Image: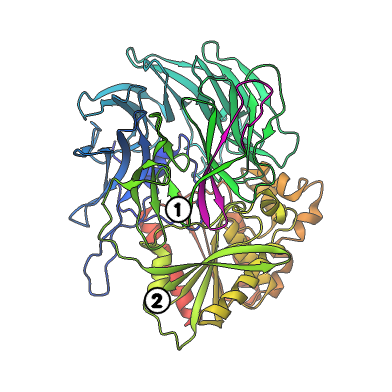
Amino acid sequence: MICNLAGIRLIDVLCRVSSRFVSQLSIASSALSVGLLLSPAGAAEASLHHFLFVAISPDGTRVASVEVEETVDPAKPKSQVLAIRPVGRGATVRLQPCDVAPTCAYASPAWSPDSQRLAFVVQGQGLARRFVYEVNADGSGLRRLLAFDGTLGALRFARNGAELSLLATAGAHKEIGATQPGAPIVGEIGARPDVQRIAVLATDTGQLRYASPADLFVYEYDRGPDDNFVGTAAHGNGDDNWWVARLYAFDGRSGAARELFAPTSNRMQLAAPRLSPDGRLVAFIGGIMSDFSSTGGDVYVLPLGGGRASPVDVTPDMPASATSLAWNCTDDTLFFSELRNEREALRSVTFSSTLPVVFETAAQPLWSAAIGISTGEMGEGRFSLACDGSHTSALVRQTFERPPEIAAGPFGAWHDLSNENADMAPETRATSVTWKNDGFRVQGWLLAPLRIDFSKPHPMITVVHGGPSAASTPRFVEGGDIRDFLRDGYYVFFPNPRGSFGQGERFTLANVEDFGGGDLRDILAGIDEIEKQAPVDDRRLGIYGVSYGGYMTMWAVTQTQRFRAGVAGAGIADWISYYGENGIDEWMIPFFGASAYDDPAVYRKSSPIEFIKNVKTPTFAFVGERDVECPAPQSLEFWHALQTLGVATSLVIYPGEGHHIRQPAHVHDLELRTLAWFDHYLR
């Protein structure tokens, strides 16, 4: 059982919507794309060191991380390593603890309350078996705690350190999350859906028991001071019902579930449930949101006990989108990260010690900057918080121009712990661009080639993010399509039109029942603004996107002749047929207001296929064969129509792939095709 890691360039810059729960391991081992590209001279280029998971110890003295290590020989596969770095002085401990093969994947590192032990999950190849291991903080004493047939993730230690809780799916048919490749559509459909449950593992005996019912699929959870849990969960298909999950409390001994909150509006999805240190309050993020782990909304709090109380909106009318939460371990202060226009920020709210829930202070700003922060590419949340009394935290920070490194320290006073990417040179100069349209202030990012003749106009490719609710944020350009575009002399534009995160729920809700309307107008107005500021040739514009961005590409070429070439990944041609084909139709009701059977008109007005005879733009489409979210027949329908109408087109369906194209050979093929398509029509 080995995980072949043939490279480390990620394509998720287009659509950062991967499941962060038990599917983390699969992403960590298979979302790694082509390895070292060769320069024109044939020499191997430096490749980025990736940080997949980051977790700080409760005492704030160490940071554990899962990383993808470089190899001297580019022909050899990359291998993952588990690193433990001191926050102060000292040597880094590097481990490859898997006793199955040297190229296993690791995930979900979790520290014991005394900061002396680190638990983590290990995956070999495929779905067959996962393991939980434990190691001492100094790298000694490695031991296996559990071997499990199914998926595992989201480890949490109990306060006594004698138990680990986790999310477990016994006998899983596929990796958890709709972005993962779907199971073969054969046999009786929907007869035995996978069920992800909260489980508790005794670290001394290896005994596993379940702490949630067998008929509830648990998406996210948190553990309280006693043997109690809270989580978001739903009955039925786990891929589909993420959008209608409710908030539950779970008795850790009996496994019984008690419903705490069910949204009364279909435009509130729940995410990131977090219990206060005393177990009295539950915080969560609520908003329309959209895809797996694409989190943005307002912060809500409600009491754990005492019936079904209504949550209190802690951030009403906030002109930003909350993205992750963490309680201070010593008092009732809640920290949260947010995206506010182009800036990531951290804030805090302190609550009263009595009920009903009252927040004693409005959200207080702690830090903000126009950078990207995370707990790793597969991590949960934007920062990992210690329990040392000084608000020490750890995270990965980066910009479009500065490569990622692990940093730790008090909020806003972090210092780098790693120096793995010091040799990576920037590929671009990035600028935040703002413009006004239809009464909205809209923001986006313009990436310029490093070597450019400003006396001549240059082509530009507009890259529309996935979602629909998401945002393009700073992420170091180190390879893949975006680097290829920049090196080939293209400007690259990442717009965040209405419907995106970053300006509050009113802005995020602004494309509801209007897909392709105001959001496309925002994008076109952004291009107008850029052409005033940069030498962009309006006669050589391209558009590119995956998922919602793929739909927007298909839609844009039916609405305007402004783009001279398009590339649509995992797009949607016909919202009516899509409603019956996809495995996640629950997401559509909040955005369209009704099902396709109840109000087909609202679906038709935004369907590219209804306007397909307007298309003149050469468009290349691609999709994964087993895409659950945007099934291949949608791309096939679009391609077939363009072929019939005599419009230049091409379609590639990549075998075995899901919503993201991950296999190295497929990623490499896609990059070559995409660049060649734009070069042919925009050069």
Query: Would you identify the image quadrant in which residue 392 lies?
Result: top left
**Amino acid type of disc 1?**
Gly
Which segment did they paint magenta?
337-361
Image height of 664 relative to 612, above or below = above
So how many labels did they put on this image? 2
What kind of element bears circle 2? Answer: loop
Using the image as rendered, state which of residue 96 and residue 473 is in the foreground. Answer: 473
Query: Which circle marks residue 488 in the picture?
Result: 2
Using the image as rendered, state which of residue 342 and residue 631 is in the foreground. Answer: 342
Identify the residue at the far front of this view. Answer: 361
Crowd band around label 2 with a 10 angstrom C-alpha radius: few (<14), some (14–19), many (20+): some
What kind of element bears circle 1? Answer: strand
| Residue 311 visible in the displayed image | yes
Residue 419 in the figure: left or right of residue 490: left
The mark lying in front, picked from 2 and 1, is: 1
Q: Quadrant of the N terminus?
A: top left
- Mark 2 or 1, nearer chain start: 1
Crowd band around label 1 with a 10 angstrom C-alpha radius: few (<14), some (14–19), many (20+): many
- Where residue 93 appears, as percent x and y from the top left, is 21, 37
**Amino acid type of disc 2?**
Asp
Image height of 523 relative to 152, above or below = below
Using the image as rendered, state which of residue 586 and residue 282 is in the foreground. Answer: 282
- Residue at 65% x, 78% y: name it: 561
Magenta-span inclusion, residue 479: no
- Where residue 255 appears, as percent x and y from the top left, is 55, 15
- Residue at 79% x, 46% y: name it: 597
Residue at label 1?
372
- Where residue 106 appears, as percent x and y from the top left, is 33, 37
- Mark 2 and mark 1 residues within 8 Å of each other at the beta carbon: no
Q: For the residues marked 2 and 1, what is the alpha-carbon distance in whole angstroms?
A: 25 Å
- Where residue 122 appears, as percent x and y from the top left, is 33, 32
Residue 483 in the figure: left or right of residue 434: left
